Amino acid sequence: MSWALFAILGLPLIAVTVSVADGWRAAQVATVVAGLGSLGLSIAVALSVEHGRGLHAAGGWLRLDPLGAVFLVTTGLLYAAAAVFSVGYLHLDEPKPDFSRFARRYFALLNLFGWTMLLVPLASDFGILWVAIELTTIVSALLVAIDRTDAALEASWKYVLIASCGLGIALLAIIVLYATGTHALGDSYIPRFARFAAHGAMLSRDAVRLSFVLAVVGFGTKVGFVPTHTWLPDAHSEAPAPVSAMLSGALLSSAFYAILRFFQVAVVAGQRSFAEHVLIVFGVISLAAASLFVLRQRNYKRLLAYSSIEHMGVIALGVGFGAPLAVAGALLHVITHASAKGLAFLGAGSLLRGYDSKEVDDVTGAATAMPWTGPMFLAAALALCGLPLSGVFRSEFQIVAGGFARPQYVGVALLLVFVNLAFFGVLWHAGRMVLTPAAAAATSSRSDGAPGERSAWMIAAMLGCLFVVIALGLHLPTALSTLISHASHLLSSPAR
Amino acid sequence: VVPTLPDWAIQVLQVVSVLTLAPLIGGLIARAEARIQQRQGPRVLQPYYDIFKLLHKETVLPDPAGPVFRAAPYVSFAGYATVPMLIPVLTSFGLPLGYMGDILGGGLILGMASFVVSIAAIDSGSPYAQLGSSRLRSFGALNEPTVIFVIFVVALTTHTDLPYVLGATLRSSAVEVVRPSHLLIVAAFFMLLLTETGRIPVESHGGTLEFGQIEEGRVAEHSGPGLAFLRWGSTVKQLVLYVIFANVLVVPWGLAADGRLDHVLEAIALLLAKAVAIGALVVVIECSFAKLRLYKVPEFTVASFMLAVLAVVMFLFAPSFGAVRLSVFGAAATITAVVVLLLELGMLRSQDVWEQLRLYSLGSTVVAALAFATAASGHGGSSLYVLGAVTIGLKALLFPIGIRFVLRNLEADPRVPSSIGVPSSILIAVALSAFAFVVLRPVHIGGEAALPLEALPVAVGGVLVAFVLMVVRPYAPSQLLGFLALENAVSVASLAIAAGLPIILALLLLFDVLVGVLVFVVLVQYLAVARTAVRTDVLDRLTG
C-alpha cells in the first residue's frame, strides 16, 4: 500500500505541471482529478492504517500512522472540495483580460498548496514536518495575494511576516528537542517521531518543556492561537474563497498536527500534565478572544475566520483535557470542523459571487435569492454552532463529556460559556444574511444583475461538504472511530 | 644578569610611560584617520610639537578670569597623572601607591579633573566655553551611572574593587572574561570610552572649532602653557581609559610579574601594542559612522547605560552549572551571541536602511565565523564549514546586495521611520533580553556543564529583540531585516546548543532564510507596485 503515499504526493504535482505547461482548461480538469484522487487515496490509506499499523515509504522518510491519517483525510477532503469549487468560482472571471494567465497561476498554486499540506501528515521526522509547514506558508501567502488588491497585499504581507516569525520559533523548538536528544540518540541522528517515542524517558525534562512551549507558540502562530492570531482573519477574508476554506480547514489543523507531535514527545518524556496545562491555557484564551470578536464582525468572511480560531481553541482544550474520550473528540473535531468550515467558506464564496460584497449588511434574503447557497450557508452556521445532527455536535459533546470525566470543571465551564457566545454571534449574523427579506432596491442597481446562483460546480462542492457534516452527525463509521481511537492512543502514555 | 628594578622605580616608570606615550597614541590615531580619508594628515609626533610650542607661548587671560581659571589646567593634569598610579599599567602585582584608592577613587579623580575644567570654562565668562561645559555636564550625568554599573559587575565577579585585584582575579579564571555579563560591560565601557574621549559618534575630534563640539569647546579660552597641559591631559586621560579597558576588563595579560628590567620593558611594549589596537578600533568607528546630531547624543549614552543594566541582570541571574571550563567553542559561541545581540540593538537604533543592511551583514559574518570556529575546534562535523561558507555567501553578501538592489530600483527613501522613540525601543529590547535570560536560566538542556549554555538565553534574547525591530519599524525593508536578524539569532542558538548539527538542521536554517527572502522580495515588489512606497504603517485597513 505504500505506493499510495507516492500517488497522493504525485497527483497534485502532476496537476501543477499541467497548470504551468498547458492551458487553463486542462488545468481545471487536472485540478479536479488531483483533488478527488487525493481524497480517494487518502481514505484508502487511512483505512489501511486504521488498526494502528504504520505505512512506510521512501526508506522511512515518509510514514503514515493513524494520527497522521486523521489529518491526511481532513486535508484531502478540503483539497477536493476546493478543487471542484474553484472551477465554478473562477468561471465568473472568464471575460476579464489576462484571465488565462491568472487561472493557470491560480490552479498551479492551489495544487502546490494542496501538495504541501498533504506532505505534512506524511512526514516521518521533525525536519520534513517543519519544511512542509514552511512551504505551506509560502505557497498560501502567494495565494492570498493573488488578487493583487491593496487589501490582499496587506493581508499577505502580515501573514508572511507573522507566520515566518512563528516558524522561526518553531525551528528553535525543534533544535532544543534535537539538542536534548543527542544524549540518548547519538551526535547526529534524524529526528524521527518514532525514535523520540522509543527514547522519551531519557530526554531532559527542562528541554522537553521548553521545546513544547516554543512549539505551541511557534506552530500556534499558524494554528491561530491568540495572541499570535492577528494574521488569520486578514488572510482568510482576503484570500479567494476556496483558498480560505483550505486555510481554515486544513492549514490550521496541519499546524496543530505539528503541535500534537511535540505533545507526543512530551507524553513519552513524562511531561504530560505540563503539556496539557499549556494547551488548556492557550485554548481558553483563543476561545474567549475569538468568541468575543465573532460578535462584532461586519464582514462575514472575517466572522468565519474568528470562528476558526474559536474551534482551534476547542480542539486544544479537547487534547488538554487529556481524557481518552476528549482526545478522541478533539481528533474527530478536526474532521468535523474542517467539513463544516469548508462548507461555510465555500458558501461565503458563493454569496460573495452572488452579492459582490463581503459585508454582512449587504447580504439579505439569501434564502430566496440563492436557493441552494442560502440554506446550505445557514446549515453550515448551525453546524459550526454545534447543533445536533451535525458532526460538530458529536465531537464537541465528546470533548465536554471527556472534560467532565477528568474532571476539568473550570475548563469545561469556560468552554461552554464561550462556545455559546460564539453560537449567538455566528447565528445572529448568518440568520440575518439568509432569512431577512431581500432589499429589492439595493440589488437592482448592480451591473451584473440580481443576486443568484452562479455555478453548479460551486453547489456540487458545497453539497459534498454538507454530506460529510450531516453523515458524521448521524452515524460515525466504524472504520473512522477505530482510526481515531488508535490515533488518540498514540497521544496517551504507553504506560497507561 | 638582568637588573631588577625596585618598586618605587617601577611606580615612577608607570606614570612616566603613560605621560610620554599618551600624545603618541593621539598622533597615531589622527594620522591613521587622515590616511584612511585620503588625506596627508599631521605627523605622528605632531602632538609633542604642539605641546612643546604651546609651552613657549605667553598666556592670554580673558577679562573675568580668576585664579580658578589659571589653576584649572594644572589641577586637572595633576589628576590625570595621579590615576596611572592606581591602575595596573605595567605590573600584575600591586605597587606601593597602587592601594591608595580603589577603582571608584580613580573614577572620582578623573571626574574631578574634568570638573575643574568645566568650572574654569564658567570662570572664563565665554559663552562658547560655557556651552561646551554645560553640554558635557548634562550628557555626563548619564555616563556616571554606567560607570557605577560597570564597576558593580566587575566587583561582584571578583569580590573586590581594587583595580590590581580585579585584573588578577580575571587572570586566574579566564572564563569570566567571556561571560555574557562581562562582554556586555566591555561593550558598555567601550561606548563610555568613546564618549569620554570625545570620539565619533558623539563628537568630531580635533581640527577647527565647531559649534557642536563639547570637549574641545570647553578649552576655547585657554592659551599658552595652560592649553599645553590641557591638551596633554586629555591625551593622558584617553590612554588611562584605554589602559583600564585593556588591563582591567579585556586582556589583563602581558604585564610584568616581577621587577626585572626586561619584563618591565616588555610590558611597556605590550602596553603600546594594546593601546594601538584599541586606537585602531576607534579609527575604524570614526571612519565608518557619522557624528550624531547633538540631541541624539543622550540616546548613545542611554544605550550604554542600558547595556550595563542588562549586564547586571545577566550577572545576577547567570545559570550555575558548577565549575565551567573555558573552551574555544564556548567562548566563541558566547561572544557571537552577545555580538549578534549588540548588532541588533544597533539596528534598532539606526535610522538609515543602508546602515541596517551593513549591521545585518556584519552579524551574518559573525555567525559564519562561529560556524568556522566550531568546526575548527572539533565540535561539529565538516558540514559546518559548508554552513559557514553558505552563510557568508548568502546572508552576508547575496541578501544585502539583493535588498540593496531592490531598494535602489524602487528609489525607496533610506530613512527608516520608527513608531516609538529610540530610547524607548532600546529599553524594551533590553527588558526583553533580560526577560529571556531570566526565564531560560533554569532550563538545563542536559549534557556537559559547558559555557555555551549561557549563549542560548542570550541568543533567545536576540530573537525577541528582532521581534521588537519588526514591530517598531513600519517599513517593509526593516521588517525584512528584522526577520533575517531573527534567523541569525536562531542560527546562533542552534550552533550553541546543537553544535553536532547534522546537515539536516543546517538545511533547515538556510531554507528558512532562502524562502523568507524569496517571498519578502516578491512582496516588497508588490507593495512598490501597489503604492510606490514601502512603508507598512499605511497598511491599516484590516483590523478587528
Image (cartoon, rainbow, N blue to C red):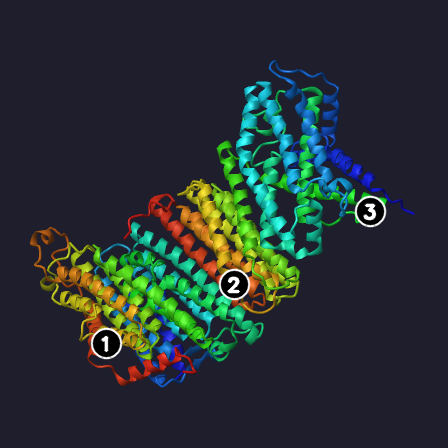
Secondary structure of residue under mark 2: loop
Residue closest to the eye, B82 or A292: B82
Please state the horizontal and vertical placement of residue B245, each as a whole percent of the image: 66, 44
Which chain is disc 3 placed on? B
Q: Which of marks 1 and 3 is in front?
A: 3
Q: What residue type is labelled 2?
A: Pro
Residue at the extreme right of the image, as rendered: B1
Please state the horizontal and vertical placement of residue A62, each as a whole percent of the image: 44, 77
Please state the horizontal and vertical placement of residue A353, each as a whole percent of the image: 19, 59
Q: Residue drawn 47% across and 49% down?
A: B429
Q: Residues within 10 Å of mark 2 (few under 14, many from 20)?
A: some
Looking at the image, residue B220 lies above or below residue A100: above
Q: Which amino acid does label 1 sit on?
A: Arg
Please state the horizontal and vertical placement of residue A489, each as a whole percent of the image: 37, 81
User: Counting residues from the N terminus, which is met first, the one under dot 3 or under dot 2?
Assistant: 3
Q: Circle 1 sits on which residue?
A: A394
Q: CA gap, disc 1 to disc 2?
A: 43 Å
Give residue B263's mark: 3
Q: Circle 2 sits on which residue?
A: B442
Q: Which of marks 1 and 2 is in front?
A: 2
Location of the N terminus of chain A (image quadrant)? bottom left
Tell whether B301 sits left or right of B265.
left
